[in-house]
Amino acid sequence: MTSEPRTIEIVGGGLAGLSLGLALRQARVPTTIFEAENYPRHRVCGEFMAGLKPDTLRRLGLGPYLADAVPNQSVAWFRQGELIRRHRLPAPALSLARHTLDARLANAFVDAGGTLKTHTRVDLSDTSREGRIFTCGRARARSDWLGLKLHLRHLPLVSELEFHLGHAAYVGLCRLPGDAVNVCGLFRRQSEATGRGAALFLSYLEASQLRALGERLVGAELDETSFSAVAGLAYGGSVAPAAADRIALGDAFATIPPYTGHGMALAFESADCALTPLVQWAHGESDWSRTTAAIAGVLRSRFAWRLRLARLLHPFIFSTRRQRFFGWAQRTGLLPLRALTQAVHG
């Protein structure tokens, strides 16, 4: 066992990287996080966490930073403006803006003695360095998918969480602290959708046969700084073979499609999976090859089924033809929503 703990380097300061870094510092492990951007900033994100286990929050020490998160449990599903089903989640989903949460965790990490290097890029091809963890987000790919996000105030909701299915589109709404609502959508690119900022979002709603939702948004107060967009999204819902010398967490491990799984919860859970093996490595209780193998095994055990189910469900949310079946099954009660929700939330 070494007298002084080895240093852990984390490439990427999103939820997985920040929560892991904070937990490592709480375990007195020297930790450096490299982040290409800065805080605070808005990101395309559903901004609600469903299925997050209390033990995960406790081990990562996240409770104080989620204390004011809004608990959302009632759900309403719409297809092209028509209400098709209401239900309740098995447990409340916690909602908090990434703009707020990322900044809180970054500040807490620094206050705990961690080294945070913002505006710093790292060579991602260098995977052989022991003690380096990759939490640098989803891999870019050639894709037709486009993600858009807005925050609005004074927007009445039909339910605490709303999910809208449109033509090759999915839009989720959730309550946030301070009478704010997060509106986040995933769309297939369409040439007829034009504009910038909120106008682009509204144009995509129109092109996706979600005009009624767009009309509701027009009447609310827009936070102009909240608009975010991301392209090059690849969704497959499967776990790629782990590199023998590389530990990847969060979206860098696997990008799960909307609703079929929750990226925020997956980010925290994957950090939790890696925490104990990394602390053991830092104290000289394990070599790097055994550490990477142990973390890869835990990640597969926890997420493989969830990701396979996501791959199965994804087409029913975005394919117009399969949406009809999805809506019919919801209206008739043939779709076991509670069981499916528990499965995709882990």
Image (cartoon, rainbow, N blue to C red):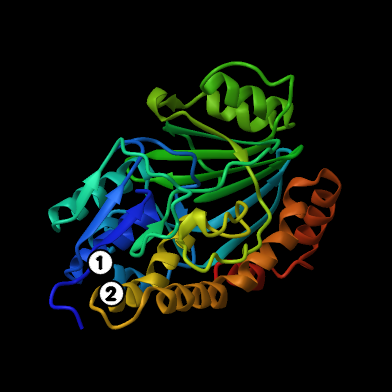
Q: Is residue 151 left or right of residue 184?
A: left
Evaluate whether residue 7 shows in this view.
yes
Residue 328: x %, y % from top left: 82, 56
The residue lying at 51 percent from left, 54 percent from top is 251
Q: Is residue 26 left or right of residue 257?
A: left
Name above or below for residue 189 compared with residue 297: above
The residue lying at 42 percent from left, 73 percent from top is 273
Who is closer to the viewer here, 253 or 195?
253
- Mark 2 lies on residue: 279
- Quarter of the image where the C terminus is located: bottom right
The local crowd at label 2, few if under 14, some if 14 to 19, many if 20 or more residues have their Cα within 10 Å, is: many
Who is closer to the viewer here, 246 or 39?
246
Name above or below for residue 143 compared with residue 196: below
Evaluate whether residue 159 shows in this view.
no
The residue lying at 42 percent from left, 56 percent from top is 134
Three-letter code, disc 1? Leu
- Circles 2, 1 touching at the beta carbon (< 8 Å): yes
Q: Which mark is residue 141?
A: none
Q: Earlier in the sequence, mark 2 or mark 1?
A: 1
- Quarter of the image where the N terminus is located: bottom left
The residue lying at 47 percent from left, 34 percent from top is 155
Three-letter code, disc 2? Val
Who is closer to the viewer here, 160 or 297?
297
Residue 8: x %, y % from top left: 28, 62
Residue 163: x %, y % from top left: 62, 48
The local crowd at label 1, few if under 14, some if 14 to 19, many if 20 or more residues have their Cα within 10 Å, is: many
Instruction: Name the secondary structure under disc 1.
Output: helix
- Mark 1 lies on residue: 24
Name above or below for residue 137 compared with residue 343: above
